[in-house]
Image (spheres, grey):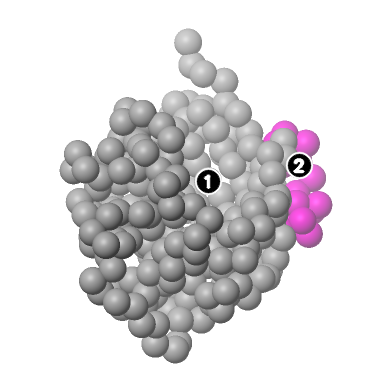
Amino acid sequence: MNSLIQELKEHDIHVLKNDEQIMLEVFHGAPKEISKVDHLIIELFSTAHTYGYKRVTLECTNQLFNQLNKTREKMRIIGERVLYTSQLINEITIDKAHYEVWLPFEDRSIRLLATIMDVDKGESKKFLQSMKVELPSQYHEMFTVYIVDGIPVGIVLPHIEPNTDQEGRMFWIGVHPNYKGIGYGALLHKLGLYRLQIDFHAKTYVGITTIKNKPMKNVMLSNGCNQLNTLVLLEYRLKTKM
């Protein structure tokens, strides 16, 4: 498995994995030897099954999707998303009194996340565990809570994407249901950008949202991000081992 993943990386495929899935990404340009990449992805399906993974996803441009002939036959489209980016050159300022960094597995963190995501505490813990698996060296620094008059109104989880040149992303962002629709989304996103620049030393920011998520697209535009590619998201479900 590791040698196959390494070979995909050598062909410019960004690879992430957690306990249940393997995620492949190609956001810019075309990888080396597209026919070889096509073959490697098909090989990954059978190999991932033997290791107990439940699914493989691929997110790429429509141009690349149309060139991956074998992969296209095996995977199904589950959505379209839009890619935004920003060069983190100009200094971002924010009032430090407006946020706190909590440890992710504290009870207050689990409860707040569950409320904002509208799930039970078990699902909240499962989400945090997936974050820990994907980002083991960063997860304890990511749980950033936006505070207004002493009340937590939102969470943003900034991090550096592994195996990149200081590319900053936000693992997740969410506003408390009691405070939606009054502008906290843009402030929370700006807080994420601030922490990426100051605490994580990111050079760039990459943000992705669904093509129909107009509020989030407006948030990124309001914070100086530029729209780049439209991406297609594909999935291959692996048969569960008996």
Amino acid type for the residue under numbered disc 2? Arg
* Chain-order first, disc 1 or disc 2: 1
For image coordinates 70% across by 52% down, the residue present is: 212
Magenta includes 172? no
Left of 160 or right of it: where is 12? right
Question: Crowdedness of circle 2 by 10 Å Cα count: few (<14), some, many (20+)?
Answer: some
Quadrant of the rendered image containing residue 211? bottom right
Work out how far the residue at label 1 is from the one at label 2, CA to CA, in angstroms.
16 Å
Residue 181 in picture, x, y percent from top left: 53, 56
Quadrant of the rendered image containing residue 120? top left
Q: Is residue 197 above or below residue 31?
A: below
Q: Give the residue number, with chain letter if any, for mark 2.
A: 72
Q: Give the residue number, with chain letter if any, for mark 1.
A: 23
Residue 18, visible in the rendered structure: no
Magenta residues, dominant SS class: helix
Residue 154 in picture, x, y percent from top left: 37, 54
The number of discs equals 2
Quadrant of the rendered image containing residue 141? bottom left
Residue 227 in picture, x, y percent from top left: 66, 71
Question: Crowdedness of circle 1 by 10 Å Cα count: few (<14), some, many (20+)?
Answer: some
Magenta region: which residues? 61-75
For image coordinates 43% across by 68% down, the residue present is: 187
Amino acid type for the residue under numbered disc 1? Met
Tags 1 and 2 touching, CB below 8 Å:
no
Say which quadrant the N terminus sits in.
top left
Residue 65, visible in the rendered structure: yes
Magenta includes 71? yes
Q: Secondary structure at mark 1?
A: strand
Q: Nearer the viewer, residue 69 or 211?
A: 211
